């Protein structure tokens, strides 16, 4: 069973005691409203996340969640502006951006990139969280 959104945010807080940087991804195109994406950004910043990627969800196989809409490039630019205004050190937002995007930017002294978690918030205020290395979407 996947951890709840609050459990994942708590993990970010704990990671900051060990590492200097954390990274998370939001996938859009699942029926979410911009206000829901902004709420996830706020939650991530409050938990100490400082690098975020936002990308377009693409249905990997017919049995996975369907795409509910494609986000316009202008909206990705707006999301990036909002991320930076909220205090994220780095934000990469675009239709082909993924959690593995520029992984070397947030490296610890040993060179291991901090990748964090993927958090999705879909319509109806239902929050879905999965580890970034899981392929369950």
Image (cartoon, rainbow, N blue to C red):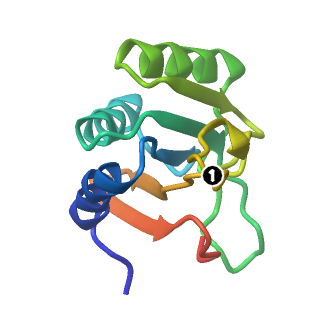
Q: Is residue 110 above or below residue 45?
A: below
SS label for mark 1:
loop
Find disc 1 in the rendering and name its residue. Answer: 113
Residue in the image at 30% along x and 62% along y: 11
Q: Residues within 10 Å of mark 1 (few under 14, many from 20)?
A: some
Left or right: 15, with 82 as reference point: left
Q: Residue at x 41, y 30 (%)?
A: 34
Question: Which quadrant of the structure image shows residue 9?
Answer: bottom left
Residue 23: x percent and y percent?
A: 50, 45
Quarter of the picture containing the N terminus is: bottom left
| Residue 116 x, y percent position in the rendering | 49, 56
Q: Nearer the viewer, residue 12 or 129?
A: 12
Q: Quadrant of residue 134?
A: bottom right
| Identity of the residue furthest to the front in this view | 109
x, y (%) of residue 112?
64, 56
Q: Position of residue 124 (x, y in %)?
A: 29, 53
Q: Quadrant of the C terminus?
A: bottom right
Q: Nearer the viewer, residue 49 or 83?
A: 49
The image shows a total of numbered marks equal to 1
- Asked if 2 appears above or below 13 in the picture, the reply is below
Tell me the residue at 74%/39% (across/down). Answer: 102
């Amino acid at each position: 069973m996947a951890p709840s959104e609050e459990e994942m945010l708590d993990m970010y807080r704990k990671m900051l005691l060990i590492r200097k940087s954390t990274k998370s991804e939001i996938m859009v195109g699942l029926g979410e409203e911009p206000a829901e994406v902004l709420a996830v950004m706020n939650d991530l910043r409050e938990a100490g996340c400082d690098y975020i990627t936002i990308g377009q969800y693409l249905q990997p196989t017919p049995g996975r969640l369907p795409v509910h809409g494609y986000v316009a490039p202008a909206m990705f630019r707006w999301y990036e502006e909002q991320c930076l205004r909220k205090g994220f050190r780095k934000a990469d937002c675009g239709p082909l951006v993924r959690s593995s995007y520029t992984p070397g930017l947030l490296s610890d002294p040993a060179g291991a990139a901090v990748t964090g978690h993927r958090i999705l918030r879909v319509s109806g205020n239902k929050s879905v969280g999965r580890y970034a290395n899981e392929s369950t979407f």
